[in-house]
Image (tube, rainbow, N blue to C red):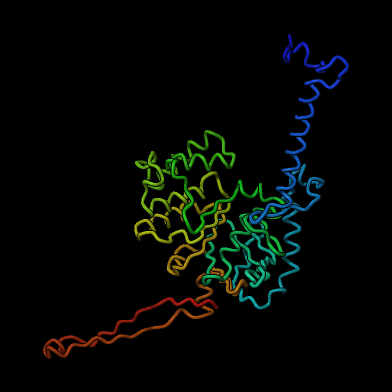
Amino acid sequence: MAQGIQWSNIKKGAQPNDNFSFLYCMIMMIVDSILYMLLTIYIENVFPGEYGIPQPWYYPLTKTYWFGYDVKKNRQRTNEINQNQINTNTNIESNDNDNIHQEDIGVDIQNLSKYYRNKIALKNLSVKFYRNMITSFLGRNGAGKSTTWSILTGLLPPSSGTAFIDGYNIITDIKIIRKRLGFVPQYNILFDRLTVKEHLEFFSALKDSPPKLIEDETKKMLEDLGLENKSKNYSTQLSGGMKRKLSIAIAFIGNSTTVILDEPTAGVDPFARRAIWDLILKYKLGRTIVLSTHHLDEAELLSDRLAIISSGELKCIGTTMDLKHKYGEGYNLIVELTSISDENELRKQQQLAVIIHISNFTYC
């Protein structure tokens, strides 16, 4: 009677003179699995497809891959490059604050370009975003704002140039950057079968936050959002304004040091819009916050600095007051209101002049 595989015969072949045993088969399968896994990881990094930043073919042989990244040395090298490039972009109208230290740079974009077949999305874009500041990135539709965000978050590879976030290179260290980065796209990306609290806990855990920090940060974020009574509701049960607030909270949770907000108040009511403003301002300290918006009053209220982009090129950058002083504060519209229906009332009232001040920003 034939006997199946047992521990006692696992090293024996099926035939008396056959040395090929079941143990050899298992060893071959394990070795093949390891080889295929390593090959899959390598191909995924070198050829990521439409979305993702490809690594050089020799990336497993680099020192940074095995021993990490020296942020201090890179910042010194970055500062030297910045000094050499000060006069390269002479067409940019800059009103930047020269007193800002190089150590306060949160995001440093250097000659970033993105080319498609029939279109130039970005052309040698160089701009810095600073910590403890909110910078509005303004421009018309198609100016290159969303392309910039896609490159900074690692969704698209740049055609040339690079950027540094907290001293890390987006091309070689995007995995490290993503643990420190929060991003709100134009449209909410939420899970239908997760509650509000579960969303916050999930995204905080993705950034390797310790369990105690996840619990404390989630509780505090729910209080700041005013969503304590909605913490067990699914995202599908929330209003549009609440969904937007949840998306922004996800960007800040997990101790994100850099937060990118792509039209954060789009499609929300005035009350929710104000709550979002308060949340952004409250979490400003210690973070680099960059936002794009079509509401110029929002940009003026929230921002420490404004950067204006057109056709993929930076046109001007500076504080709100600097840009107003340079390009003018708008225009005055004088309206004279008179009434001729009642002559007695006309004599009692003087001519009324109403001056409406309109802050009119142009895209330089």
Q: Residue at x 33, y 85 (%)?
A: 334
Q: In this view, does 55 lie to the left or right of 272?
A: right
> Can you tell which quarter of the image residue 194 is in?
top left
Seen in the picture, residue 182 relative to 38 is either above or below; the reply is below
Q: Where is residue 118 in the image (x, y as percent from the top left)?
A: 65, 72
Q: Where is residue 59 in the image (x, y as percent from the top left)?
A: 78, 49
Total marks placed = 0
Q: Which residue is drawn at 73% across and 59% down?
A: 78
Q: Residue furthest right?
A: 17
For the C terminus, the quadrant is bottom right
Q: Which residue lies furthest to the front in this view?
A: 1
For the N terminus, the quadrant is top right
Q: Which residue is drawn at 52% across and 65% down?
A: 136
| Closest to the observer, 238 or 128 | 238
Q: Which residue is drawn at 68% across and 52% down?
A: 48
Q: Is residue 97 visible?
A: yes
Q: Can residue 105 be seen in this view?
A: no
Q: Residue furthest top?
A: 1
> Can you tell which quarter of the image residue 34 is in?
top right
Q: Position of residue 108 (x, y in %)?
A: 66, 60
> Can you tell which quarter of the image residue 358 is in?
bottom left
Q: Position of residue 218 (x, y in %)?
A: 46, 40
Seen in the picture, residue 30 relative to 190 is either above or below; the reply is above
Q: Is residue 304 left or right of residue 150?
A: left
